[in-house]
Amino acid sequence: MAPIMRDLTYDGKKKLILLAIADMVDHDGVGFASYAQIQRVTNVSTTYLTQTIREFVEDGRLEIVSKGNGPGRATVYRVVLDWQLSNSVAQNTDAELSNSVAQNYPTMTANYPTPSPSPPSITSVPNTSVHNARVRKPVDDDPGFIRFWNAYPRRQGKGHARRAWSKAVRQADPDVIVAAAERYRDDPNREDGFTALPSTWLNGERWLDDPLPSRDNRHDRKTTDVQAVIERAAARDAREITA
């Protein structure tokens, strides 16, 4: 059992199970062992023992020489110390081991379940839908918006303008909006410093606005307002003096 103790492939309960089986074999590595015998030494569950023995067989560390199917039959195992050579050794000794087992190992009562077949493996398929999805960049695919953007006198905040345009065309005809934008652009009373952003103009439904007031009228109104303030201040001062 020294090679098994030095083997770092398994640890914990798995190594204990392998040691328990190895303790029941002869110098050729062959011996019978029931689940009950192994569990008395290892204190593991039947499910865990079945899975572990299957793993030993798949790894080449354990060979099942004679399977004890049914009551009164114990499974005969062969512990493979040099597991890398297990396949070539097994081919030459299988017949001899079967004869040796029949002659030297009596029938023993063993109450243990037959290992169930391994469940079918499930191959995971990577989800590539996210990687294969095409990312669409905003495009000026609306001819009406292109006309509006080219006509509007202030080209700023195009993304906001595009979203505002999609809302505006649900309320008014695109040709009406573009024509109003052209009028706003060409209005001689529009001042560049006070030109609304395109998104603001659209959200405010400014295509319904009247023409801008004349700059001259606005200047005259401002002048009149200033003069009125001066006159009211002068009258107030006069009353205070006479009082």
Image (cartoon, rainbow, N blue to C red):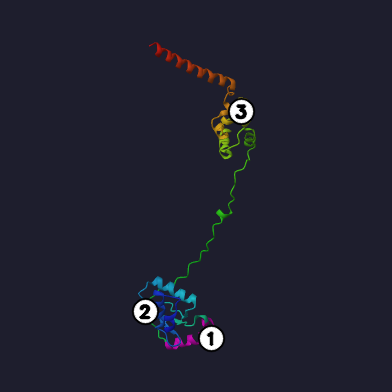
Disc with the residue nearer the chain's start (2 vs 3): 2
Q: Nearer the viewer, residue 230 or 207?
A: 230
Disc assigned to residue 184: 3
Q: Amino acid at mark 3?
A: Tyr
Residue 90 in view (yes/no): yes
Disc with the residue nearer the chain's start (3 vs 1): 1
Residue plotted at (46% across, 74% down): 55
Nearer the observer, disc 2 or disc 3?
3
What secondary structure prevails in the magenta region?
helix
The quarter of the rendered structure image containing the C terminus is top left
Q: Nearer the viewer, residue 102 or 60?
A: 60
**CB within 8 Å, label 2 to label 3:** no
Name above or below for residue 211 compared with residue 68: above
Nearer the observer, disc 3 or disc 1?
3
State yes or no: residue 166 in magenta: no
Q: CA distance from mark 3 to mark 1?
A: 99 Å
Using a 10 Å C-alpha cutoff, classify the residue at mark 3 as few (fewer than 14 neighbours), some (14 to 19) or many (20 or more): many
Name the residue tied to disc 1: 92
Question: Left or right of 111: which side holds 192?
Answer: right
Q: Which secondary structure, mark 3?
A: helix
Q: Nearer the viewer, residue 154 or 114?
A: 154
Residue 95 location, x and y as percent?
Answer: 51, 86
Q: CA distance from mark 2 to mark 1?
A: 29 Å
Name above or below for residue 68 compared with residue 229: below
Q: Quadrant of residue 127?
A: bottom right
Disc assigned to residue 37: 2
Specify start and end residues of the magenta stretch as a single range: 85-104
Residue 14 location, x and y as percent?
Answer: 41, 75
